Amino acid sequence: MRVNGRPHRTIWPSSDGVSVEIIDQTRLPHEFAVARLATVGEAAHAIKAMLVRGAPLIGATAAYGLWLALRVDPSDRGLAEAGVALMATRPTAINLRWAVERMTAWVAPLPPGKRAAEALARAAELCDEDVAINRAIGAAGLKVIQAIAAGKRPGAPVNILTHCNAGWLATVDVGTATAPIYAAHDSGIRVHVWVDETRPRNQGASLTAWELLNHGVPHSVIVDNAGGHLMQHGHVDMVIVGTDRTTATGDVCNKIGTYLKALAAKDNGVPFYVAAPSPSIDWRVRDGVKEIPIENRSAHEVTHLAGRLPDGSVVTVGVTPEGSPAANPAFDVTPARLVTGLITERGIAEASERSLLSLFPEKSQLVFNP
Ligand code: MRU
């Protein structure tokens, strides 16, 4: 992706050789700021406080976090404690566990003196893999958009609704849900994106809109409640969202509000696609509603909003009566029956165990095996 014309990733090893740098997403869209993480504690904080967010990027940050930990303490205990600290940051996105388990399996067999260097190389490898996966998702999803475009009046845009930010800011680069959108736009198909603002943290309004703007993709930010109305009036050709955890049976856990969009899509015959990279699939879970832990975040995210004043300063204001309690479940689960297709790096699967395993047969021994 390009920011102000320059190619960028969301995370990269710093030139000082002892830290990693990230885009601080809490400052967007008002300011493009880079933050430096030099310790595993800083990496854990960046994930928990959402300087980095989005399932794949959380995984990538945890991978570099393990490297930062091993630089200081490469012992078995140091490795285990760092893994526990990182995994405790955010409970829902499975990529976190995926990255920590994978990194641990790579470095644990090595003598302590060799672990840090290996962890650094492997974290970089994991990031490159994320980008390759997302490009493949883009290619697979492009075919769906092409088919929809072919059925429309020549020159009419394909209207795509997306929720939260499953774009390049949620990954190392390219994005998952946005990958087919960018691929379609770049190949000359007219697309227009309905961007759900995605309360309470507004990842759609502040992050997805920002990156679509940077890439020149036509879009409109809408309030979260507008999607159903737009679908009823034929203004949405398809929905594409990301996922924090998809079960082996095809249930999709994603940002709160995704389920309501899937219900509205079903009622209006709008195809509902999920961009699902394989590291986001939890092969050990059968029933997403019952088994996936849903992160409950601070009520402050609901009762307050941040925004920019005309003088350029960014302030946080209260929007509820003082004393009104608030609840903030951060994710919900869309049952497989509402999902038209899972766009993976190996092609499009139906939201079912049979179809997913036909694309990933090597995972069959993991299925429902805690
Ligand atoms: O709470 P967030 O901002 O980390 O939630 C992000 C989402 O729900 C994304 O849709 C999901 O992580 C998929 S990102 C490719």
Image: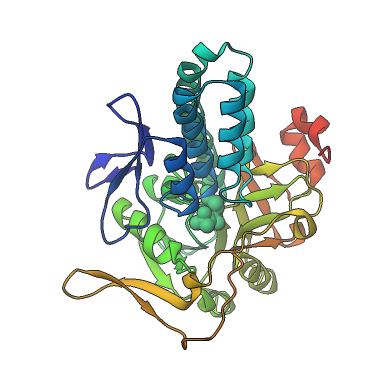
Q: How many marks?
A: 0
Residue 271 spot, x, y in % from top left: 63, 61
Rendered view: 294 above or below 82? below
- Name which quarter of the figure residue 222 lies in: bottom left
**Front residue (pair 119, 333):** 119
Residue drawn at (77%, 44%), measured in percent from left and top?
Answer: 248
**Front residue (pair 42, 132):** 42
Rendered view: 122 above or below 4? above
Q: Is 105 placed left or right of 59 in the picture?
A: right
Residue drawn at (50%, 12%), measured in percent from left and top?
Answer: 113
- Name which quarter of the figure residue 133 lies in: top right
Residue 276 spot, x, y in % from top left: 61, 46
Residue 268 spot, x, y in % from top left: 65, 73
Locate the C terminus and report the quarter of the image it occupies: top right
Q: Is residue 139 visible?
A: yes
Q: Is 160 placed left or right of 271 in the picture?
A: left
Q: Residue furthest bottom?
A: 321
Residue 198 spot, x, y in % from top left: 49, 68
Residue drawn at (56%, 48%), measured in percent from left and top?
Answer: 89
Q: Is 327 placed left or right of 316 in the picture?
A: right
